[in-house]
Structure formats: C-alpha cells, structure tokens
Image (tube, rainbow, N blue to C red):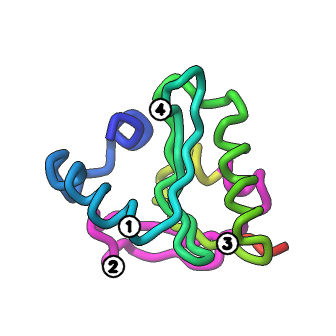
Amino acid sequence: MASRRDALPYIRNAHTDEKIRTWVPSVLLTQTQVWIAELRGAVVGFFALHGDQLDHVYLQPGYYGRGIGSLLLHKAKDLSPQRLTLWTFQRNERARAFYEAHGFVPVRFTDGSDNEEREPDVLYEWNR
C-alpha cells in the first residue's frame, strides 16, 4: 500500500486498506504465485504471477533504482519463459519506461472503463 501511494499518488484507491489487508491472504496468496525480494530480513518488493499474467509488481519506497525490480522481473521471465503480459496505468511513466527497457511492448491501450480505478491503462507483452 505504501508503494502504491508513493508511486501513484494521483490514482484513486478502489479499495480501503482494510479490504486490501483481507484480500492479500485470502485471494492474492492463494490464487497466484507470489515472489518477494528481501534485503537484510525486510521485504522490499514483490510480484504475483497468474499463468503468464504478471500482477502487482511493487517495490518499497526508497528501493527504486537498485536493480531489485530487474531481479524480480527476471524471475518472472524464468517462471514464464515464453510470454508475459501485464497491465499498468498509462500515466505511470516510471513503470512504463522500466517495462519497455526490459523488452515489454505495449499492445493495447484502454480508456480505463474496465478497471476498478477507471484510469486509462495499457497492456504490455513480452515474448522470448
């Protein structure tokens, strides 16, 4: 939640912190593969993978630009070695530049009417 607030302060939250705290253990951790990045015993980042769909790639504030996100992305590619897809908001320029630098290409732009935030987004795809 801190990562999202830091990286995307201009995007409205579709859910309360309480609902997110309930959703993570009951849905995210049971329906996806979740991988974490740990540094000196502290979780500093994570991603969730559902088939070839990469979701919820987040780093703790203050840990950007250290290669942690790249390591997480390489792990996701190892787990889904032929193809990965992911969604991000069109206004999330830092994330978009990061994904494009790692070989992802935009394949679909939407007006946001299909996501909970009602924020224009973009579907990215990576193929080996």
**What residue appears at the point 19 percent right and 45 percent down from the top-left corner?**
17
Q: Earlier in the sequence, mark 3 or mark 4?
A: 4
Residue depth check, mark 2 versus mark 4: number of the one nearer the observer? 4
From the viewer's perspective, tell me whether residue 55 is left or right of residue 40: left
- Of pointers 1 and 3, the one earlier in the residue sequence: 1
Disc number lying in front (4 or 1): 1
How far apart marks 3 and 4 lie (CA) works out to 23 Å
User: Magenta residues?
Assistant: 97-125
Cα distance, mark 3 to mark 2? 20 Å
Mark 4: which secondary structure? loop
Q: Nearer the viewer, mark 3 or mark 2?
A: 3
Of label 2 and label 4, which has the lower sequence position?
4
Name which quarter of the figure residue 10 lies in.
top left
Query: Residue 109 magenta-drawn?
Result: yes
Mark 4 Cα within 10 Å, few/some/many (few <14, many 20+)? Answer: some
Q: What residue sits right under mark 3 in the picture?
A: 84
CA gap, disc 1 and disc 3: 20 Å
Secondary element under disc 1, as helix, strand or loop, is helix
- Give the percent coordinates (x, y) of residue 30: 38, 67
Q: Amino acid at mark 3?
A: Leu
Are circles 3 and 4 on residues that touch, CB within 8 Å?
A: no
Name the residue tied to disc 4: 60
- Labels in figure, total: 4
Give me the C-alpha separation between circle 2 and circle 4: 27 Å
Task: Check the image and report above or below for 123 versus 61.
Answer: below
Q: Which mark is residue 114?
A: 2
Of residues 48 and 5, the one drawn nearer to the viewer in this rendering: 48
Question: What residue sits right under mark 1 in the picture?
Answer: 30
Q: Is residue 3 left or right of residue 97?
A: left
